[in-house]
Structure formats: structure tokens, C-alpha cells
Amino acid sequence: MLMLLDTPSLYFRAFYGIPESMTAPDGMPVNAVRGLIDMIATLVRQHSPTELVATMDADWRPAFRVAAIPTYKAHRVAFGHTEEVPDTLVPQIPVIEQVLDAVGIARLQSDGYEADDVIGTLTHQARGAVDIVTGDRDLFQLVDDSRPVRVLYTARGVRNLQLVDEAFVTEKYGIPGRGYADFATLRGDPSDGLPGVAGVGEKTAASLITRFGSLEAILAALDAGQNDGFPAGSRTKLAAARDYLRVAPAVVKVADSAPLPSADLTLPAKPRDPEALVRLADRYGLDSPLNRLLDVLTGR
């Protein structure tokens, strides 16, 4: 089984969930580093993946998404094209990358793409079962019982994951299990700067996706002048949002063909670079979490 980590989602969660008083010997906060290491140990122990990938953002606000919808994540920009990342988290990200590399956990990113797109591409390429670990609902669009692909949703913590499959999506949102991307396009997502269709909320979006099956079918019905099946007033609202609906899918849907380097995805049984790992442990005070992770990886 392949496990894909939405690494930015996890280290942000660790950063806000663990006090900054957790520091290295020199006083540098390492709460996100320690938290992520312990999360990975817990995930491997509980789910026993045979392959593991830590996906990263090479670009948290890709140009192709901004070109389609300029408001995409615009509210998160601090200066120019810099995402608002807490000052005490910024220096921890390179440490996280060094630890992953020294342990031997595959770390993949793609120029011009987000971690979500790396996950979408690896999911598309996978031949067996896939578990996606994330706190981002956008990745619900990838669930597919036939393969199976499921999301391990971290909203309640890594030790209390919600298993998201097609049945979960249907029960939660009242839509076909694989219809989340089209549903999200109609509803919008203020946290990502996606406006959605004005006046179309979750209930109307769910009704439309359930009735027509897909956004493509909804647009075809609009173009054909069809009136049946549209909730009261929604047809006019959809027609007014036709320009948005034409470009939004390219923003909402994760990529499935992001260029990726070749990499060994196998879960490491021992550290790739033990000496580097010792140096990192000493410099940043990571002995305890790294020992817990290595115990899991070596099967002790």
C-alpha cells in the first residue's frame, strides 16, 4: 500500500498543535519538526504502508491557477508572492527536509505545482491501494473505492483519523462519492479564494451534482436550454457564472500529470544516511522522536 503525506498540511498542524517552547539546544523552536516525525511514526505503526512519500509544495500558488482565477489564495499573500508562514516555522522547513532525506523517506515536489498535485499524480500512477494523509478537503476528490483510494483526514488528529471513502463523501455532502471536485467548484471555497457560483450554497450544489452527475453535464444542460432539474433560481445563477465555471475546474481539480523525478518510494528499513541523522539529532535535539520513528521502521 502506498501512503502519500500532504507534508505542508501535517507540519502546519504540528506547528500549531505543539508549543514553541519545544526547542533545540540553541533555542530554535523545533515543534513542527518533532511533531511531524511523531506523526509519521504513528502513521507507519498504525497503517503499515509498504511505500511512503512526503509530498511538498514547490509552488503554493501556481501560476496556472492564478491565471485562471486571480483571487486564488490571494488573501494569503503577505508581500508579493510570499505566503504568510509564521517566522518561527520558516527555519524548520529545511530541517524537516533534511530529516526526511537522512531517514530515506521519499520527498517529492514538482516545479510550478502544489503538494496536492504531486499527490494527484502519484495517485493516478499507482497500481494498488493508496492512502492520502491530509487535513485538506480538496483531496476528497481523489477517493475511489474501486482501486481503492481513500483519504485519512486529520481534522481530529493523526491518532484519531477519519477514513474518507466514497460512502463518507456521499453521507457528508449528499453527492456521488466521486463528485467532490465539481461540488466544490459550484460551492466555492473562501479559504482558497474561490468564489463559487453566487447564491449557490452546499445544498443547491449537492442537488445539482446529484441530479446531473457532473459539472460538465450541468453546463451541457445550460447550453441546450434545458430547464428541468434545476432548483428554483439556480439556472439563472449558473448562467451568470458561466465564465467562472469555464475556468474553475482547472483550479479546483488536482493535477494528475505533474512532472516528477524518479524515486524509490519503498518504506525505508534503515536510515539512508545515519551519520547525517546523528548530526541532525544532536543539533536540533531530536533524539527521542527520531528513535521512535526508527523503532517503527526497523520493526522493533
Image (cartoon, rainbow, N blue to C red):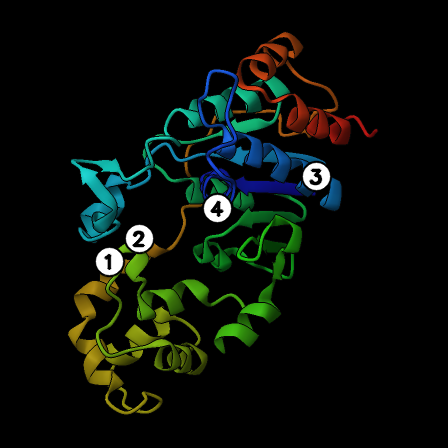
Q: Which residue is mark 1?
A: 247
Q: In the image, is residue 89 above or below residue 63?
A: above
The image quadrant where one finds the N terminus is top right
The image quadrant where one finds the C terminus is top right
Q: In the image, is residue 224 above or below residue 98?
A: below
Report the amino acid beneath label 4.
Answer: Gly
Disc 1, SS: helix
Disc 2, SS: helix
Disc 3, SS: helix
Q: Which residue is mark 4?
A: 120
Q: Which residue is mark 3?
A: 44
Residue 148 visible to the viewer: no
Report the amino acid beneath label 3.
Answer: Val
Nearest to viewer (mark 1 / mark 2):
2
Q: In the image, is residue 227 above or below residue 204?
A: below
Q: Which residue is mark 2?
A: 251
Mark toward the start of the polypeptide (3 vs 4): 3
Report the amino acid beneath label 1.
Answer: Val
Nearest to viewer (mark 3 / mark 2):
3
Q: Residue furthest top?
A: 275
Q: CA distance from mark 3 to mark 2?
A: 32 Å
Q: CA distance from mark 1 to mark 4?
A: 19 Å
Would you say the residues marked 4 and 2 are in contact, meaning their CB atoms lie under 8 Å apart?
Answer: no
Seen at 44% across and 22% down, the residue is 28
